[in-house]
Structure formats: C-alpha cells, structure tokens
C-alpha cells in the first residue's frame, strides 16, 4: 500500500476500492507533518465527497498527537 500511496504523491490516481487503505498507510508509515498536510490540502480542495472522506479518515491515521489534536479542531468546525 505504501507504494500505491507513493504513486499518488507523484500524481497517479489510486483506485477507489483501495484509496482509504493506501492513504491511511501512507500517513501512518511516513508519520510526518508534510504527508498529513497533503491529506488536509486534499480534504480542503477536492470536490469529491468520497475523496474528502478518504482524506479525513487518513488524517486520523497519524500517530502524532499534535496532528490528531488539530484534526479534532477541524472536525469541530465542520
């Protein structure tokens, strides 16, 4: 899945049936702010409700407490 996520980072489309898993694995394995910010940017800019949900779910896959706190704040404003 990390390879699929890496492909997405290079602008390759991820099949919808594995997108949630690939995004989550990418965020969890890299566990850095840059990857999380990519998901947040996707969340803010996509017009696809399913892609928005995938990005939101992936942001929750981080193990970084600061980013999880930030996600909680974002979710309260939705």
Image (tube, rainbow, N blue to C red):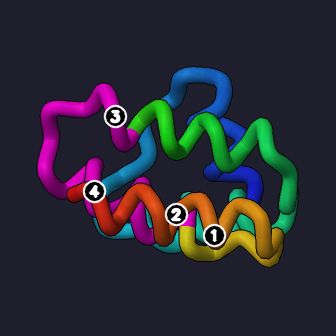
The image quarter containing residue 17 is bottom left
Left or right relative to 74: residue 78: left
**Would you say residue 22 is visible in this rendering?**
no
Q: Quadrant of the C terminus?
A: bottom left
What crowding class fits label 2: few (fewer than 14 Cα within 10 Å), some (14-19), or many (20 or more)? some
Q: For residue 9, what is the image quadrant?
A: top right
Could you tell me which residue is drawn at 19 percent across and 56 percent down? 50
**x%, y% of residue 57?**
43, 70
Q: Which residue is mark 1?
A: 69
| Image position of 15 (left or right of 2) | left
Q: Nearer the viewer, residue 45 or 65?
A: 65
| Residue labelled with disc 3 | 44
Task: State the residue at coordinates (80%, 45%).
Answer: 33
Q: Which residue is mark 2?
A: 71
Disc 1 to disc 2: CB gap under 8 Å: yes
Describe the element under mark 3 as helix, strand or loop. Answer: helix
Q: Is residue 71 above or below residue 65?
A: above
**Quadrant of the drawing holding the N terminus:** bottom right
Residue 46 visible to the viewer: yes
Spot occupied by residue 70 in the image (x, y as percentages of width and height): 59, 59
Element at label 2: helix
Q: Nearer the viewer, mark 3 or mark 2?
A: 2
């Amino acid at each position: 899945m990390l390879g699929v996520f890496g492909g997405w980072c290079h602008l390759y489309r991820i099949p919808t049936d594995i997108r949630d898993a690939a995004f989550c694995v990418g965020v969890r394995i890299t566990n850095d702010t840059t990857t999380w910010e990519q998901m947040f940017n996707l969340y803010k800019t996509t017009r696809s409700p399913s892609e928005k949900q995938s990005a939101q779910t992936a942001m929750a896959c981080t193990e970084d407490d600061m980013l999880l706190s930030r996600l909680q704040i974002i979710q309260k404003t939705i």
